[in-house]
Image (spheres, rainbow, N blue to C red):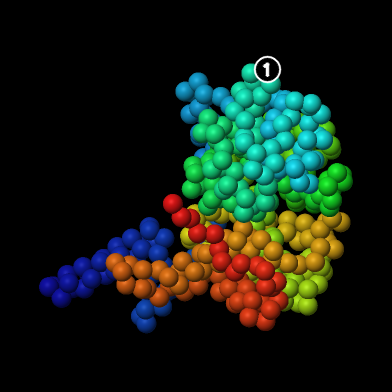
Amino acid sequence: KMARASLLCLVLLCVVSHAAAFSVGLAPRGFLGRAVRAERRAPRASTPASPWKMQVWSNNEAIQEYRDLLAGKRQDDTNDGPSVIIGDGRLGTMLRNAGGNSGDVIVKRGDAIPEELADGVTDFPLYVCVPEHEVEAVIKACPQSKLDDLVFCQKGNIELLLKKYALCGNDNTQMLPYFSIFSKESRPMSELEDMGKDSFGSPKYAGETVIVGKWKGALAQRLDRIQLPSQPRGYLDYRRSMIEHTVFESVYNLVGLLHKGIPLGEVGLYHQKECEDMIHEMHRALRGSMAVTLLSGVEGRCKALSQNTNVEMRKPKLGEFMWYNGFFYKISLDCKEFEVYGKKVDMPDPMSMHSEYLEYARDNNLIDKSVVFEPYRVSY
C-alpha cells in the first residue's frame, strides 16, 4: 500500500509540474532534456484592421512644450528686421541681400559688435557668417547682453564649442544650411532632394535646411525671399539632423578619397554598401557615447543627397577635419586613451572602419598637408 501511495504521489507531481510549465508558457522536457513541442492553440479571431496607421513616438520635446504651456512660457515667433551680420563673405552677403533692410549692420573682422542699432533698437539677431574656426573669437568679442541673440549659420559640427559657452539649446538659434553658394553675390543653390512619399503618404526629403531657436522665424523669412526652403525644428530633432549632415560629409568624402578621388555622386552609385557599413558603425558609436540615435532612413537620405545636382559633381576633400571627421575620430581617440583611477584601460575602437580609412588616407598623403589632423578638444 505504501508503494502504491508513493507511486500515485509521483504521478500526481509530474502532472502538476507539466501543467505549471504550460501555464507559464514553457514546454515540458523529455527524458534527454530536449523540449517537447507543445500543440499550439488555435489563434483568437483577430479584430478588424483599423483604417488609421498608429505609431508611438517617444519625444521629450512634446513633454517640454506641454510643461512650458502649463508654466505660461511660449517662444513667440520673431519677424525679420534690421540685424547685425558678422562676416562679409558669401553667406553674409547672401543674408544681407535677402534682408532688404537698409538698417542691417555689417561687422567685418576686428570690428566691434554693437549692442544697439539705430533708433535705440536693442532686440535683434546677430548672424554669425564666419568659418567654423573663427566662431570662438566672435563669441568672445560679443557683448554679454547679446550672446543669446547670436545666430550660428555654420555647416560644420560646432556642438562641443557651443556647449563650452552654454550656447547650445532650444533657445539658441542655429541653422543647418543645405545650400551652396559658389561665389560672392551669386544665387544660392538648394540641395533639397525630393524622395517621394513615405508609408504614411507624407512627402519625404533629403538635404532639408533646418533652423532652431529664438530667431528661427526671422531667418526663415529671409530664406523665403530667395526661394530657399527651410523647416523649424526643436533642438533634439535639429541635433539629429546636424549630426546626420556630419555623417554624410565625413563618410562620402572619405570613401571618395580612397577610391581615386571620384565625385560624391559616383560614391553613392558604386560604393553605397561601403558607405552604409561605415554609417552603421557611426550610428552604434553615437548611441553608446553620446546617447544620440539618428533618424530612421539615414542611409537612404545620404544616398539621395549624393545624387543632388548641386552635390554629385563635388570632388571629395577633408578640408575642415576638426568639424567633420574629427568629431568621430575624437570618440575613437577617447576610447584609446580611456583611464580608470589613473590606469589605462584597453577599450575597442567603436568606429574601427572609419579610423582605418582615415589613417590610411593620412599615411598615404591622400589628405592635403595643410589639414590639421586633430579633433576639436574643449579647453577652459
Tell me the residue at 56%/54% (across/down): 293
Tell me the residue at 84%/52% (across/down): 182
User: Can you give x and y, in whole percent of width and height, for residue 33 in the image?
Assistant: 37, 78
Q: Amino acid at mark 1?
A: Asp
On screen, residue 332 versus residue 319, left or right, reads left
Q: How many marks?
A: 1
Quarter-of-image position of residue 299 = bottom right
User: Can you give x and y, in whole percent of width and height, for residue 369 in the image?
Assistant: 67, 73
User: Can you give x and y, in whole percent of width and height, for residue 321 in the image?
Assistant: 63, 63
Tell me the residue at 21%/68% (across/down): 9
On screen, residue 26 versus residue 165, left or right, reads left
Residue placed furthest toward the top: 119
User: Can you give x and y, in whole percent of width and height, for residue 75 in the image?
Assistant: 58, 27
Tell me the residue at 51%/68% (across/down): 332
Instruction: Tell me if I can see residue 361 in this picture.
Output: yes
* Front-lying residue, 99 or 212: 99
Please name the residue that numbered disc 1 is placed on.
Answer: 119
* Front-lying residue, 153 or 228: 153
On screen, residue 230 versus residue 290, left or right, reads right
**Rendered position, 345 above or below 314:** below
**Rendered position, 149 above or below 189:** above
* Front-lying residue, 42 or 378: 378
Which quadrant of the rendered structure holds the N terminus?
bottom left
Instruction: Tell me if I can see residue 48 in this picture.
Output: no
**Rendered position, 240 above or below 217:** below
